[in-house]
Amino acid sequence: MFDDLFNLVTGDEETYTKAKESLFEKLAKVEAVKGTDTFFNGADFAMIDAAFAPIFMRLAWINEFTDNAISINEFSNLSAWSEAILVVDEVKDSVSEGIDDVYYSNIEAREGYLSTLLVDE
């Protein structure tokens, strides 16, 4: 999934489109096995939740920066799971303050197709 995120940020429009399709195919597979519990394996935050945190964090930032260009709302379980993960203190504290601004600048600097979808901060 990280390769798809990289291609979303750096690629031209065709690469962006293919990366989004690839990412959504993978997310659909996860959606198919993810239950309706708060976290992947139930009520408790576990390693698999921590592993997906960076993916969900980047998707949330991209959606904030672009008016939902990579919205995962079609995946109801993943969307709820993402929201639950992103409010866990350990997840919030795992990144430096202002890292979202750094990520925005990275998207701009890469000058890929995604950078054309950015909305003013």
Image (cartoon, rainbow, N blue to C red):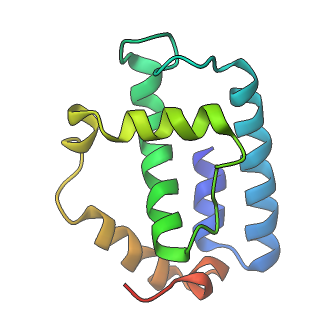
Residue 56, position in %: x, y?
A: 49, 45
What residue do we see at 53% from left, 65% from top? 63
Q: Nearer the viewer, residue 36 or 66?
A: 36
Q: Quadrant of the C terminus?
A: bottom left
| Residue drawn at x 64%, y 61% as measured from the top left | 70
Q: Position of residue 23 (x, y in %)?
A: 71, 48
Residue 4 image offset from top left, x and y in percent: 66, 53
Residue 100, given in percent of the width and then of the height, sits at 32, 65
As drawn, 14 above or below 23: below
Q: Is residue 79 above or below residue 60?
A: above
The image quarter in which residue 28 lies: top right
Point 54% across, 75% down: residue: 66
Q: Residue at left 63%, top 51%?
A: 3
Count of numbered circles in the view? 0
Of 105 and 57, nearer the camera is: 57
Residue 68: image quadrant is bottom right
Left/right of residue 119 with respect to residue 72 in the rendered view = left
